[in-house]
Amino acid sequence: MFCLSSFKHASALEFKPDDVSGLSIWLKADSITGISDEDEFGFWGDSSSSDHDFSQSTADKKPTYIASVPELNNKPAVRFDGEDDVFVSNDTFSFGDHSVFVVYQDEQGGGNDKFTKLLLNADGTDGATTFTDSSASARTVTVGGNAQIDTAQSKFGGASALFDGTNDSLSVADSEDFNFGNGDFTIDLWVRFNAFPNNAGIVFYDQRSSNGDAFNLSLDVPGGGADKTLNIADSGGLGLIISRIWNPSLAVWYHVAAVRSGNDFKLFIDGVQLGVTATNSGTLNNQTGTIDIGLTTISNVNDFDGHIDEYRVSKGIARWTENFTPPAGPFN
């Protein structure tokens, strides 16, 4: 089996693969035909004269065909999910001295992939109240209060979701996709605060069966100028899982990520872990209420005054387990 384990960046060379003597493998995305954009596929034919074709028959290991990538001059590419996507050739290779050339883009943290269960890019016309879930689930997003698209502020895409601090929220219906159990998950988003409440909390993710039984990611804002804390809590089961001091400023965009990897719970701000890892082997309660953003709708508390962009919930993957560079663009 032929395997690539590392890459070394080199200065630019001007040549075409078919100019190379002894070309053994040439896998090019623009040779792929009959596959629609964002579809997984199981065969990648070799464009060299050696006929070293690559394939994958296992459904959840098939890579995804991307018809047009802006960073590659709108040429096609093949996306691997960073977990178990792989193409395999069962041919026997005997290279001796050899060179490997690859054009690739490292999508640290992934994008809109099979693990993505909710994705709100928050793009659209200023003042619009329609929010689109760009994940494969295409969930209906219900708007509460005066939550709306705002083009005055954005991290990416020219717009974001505006919450004015008075009963604004976004919510989606319960689904088995949000029953995290004891598995890996990631909740990440970009957030910008316009004002902080007094002795209250700011809800980034809240799902509850009752007021006393909830799972949430929130920023606790105590009165009297005390430190704010970013928290993951399962009030009906595991209790307060992790709480770390974070004192953000107003009018600044921050990337927030809450991650479970095995028994490890971590919080990241702009790619830097807050404090130490919390360890808990327990199973999160399977909540039955809606997933609420910006407001706890059952109790109608914890109003948020600010903006959110590129909001994503992922199940079955810990997208980051150590410090990382925050996403440099929208999730496509």
Image: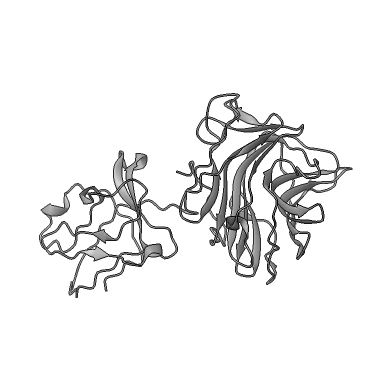
In this rendering, the answer to whether 195 lies above or below 314 is above
The total of numbered circles placed on residues is 0
x then y, percent, for residue 196: 78, 37
Q: Work out which quarter of the rendered image holds the N terminus and state it.
A: bottom left
- Does the rendering let one see residue 311? yes
Which residue is outermost to the right?
224
Q: Position of residue 331 (x, y in %)?
A: 48, 44
In the image, residue 328 lies at what x, y percent? 49, 43
Identify the residue at image location x=71%, y=53%: 216
- Seen from the viewer's position, the closer of residues 282 and 246 is 282
Coordinates of residue 312 in the picture (x, y in percent): 56, 48
Q: Hey, which quadrant is residue 70 in on the image?
A: top left
Q: In which quarter of the image is the C terminus?
A: top left
Q: In which quarter of the image is residue 294?
A: top right
The answer to whether any part of residue 85 appears in the image is no
Task: Report the colour scheme.
Answer: one colour
**Image: 127 above or below 66:** above
- In screen coordinates, is 230 left or right of 112? right
Q: Does 317 appear above or below 140?
A: below
Q: Is 160 left, or right, of 278 in this rendering?
A: left
Give the residue drawn at x 30%, y 52%.
Answer: 103
When asked about the image quadrant of residue 175, the answer is bottom right
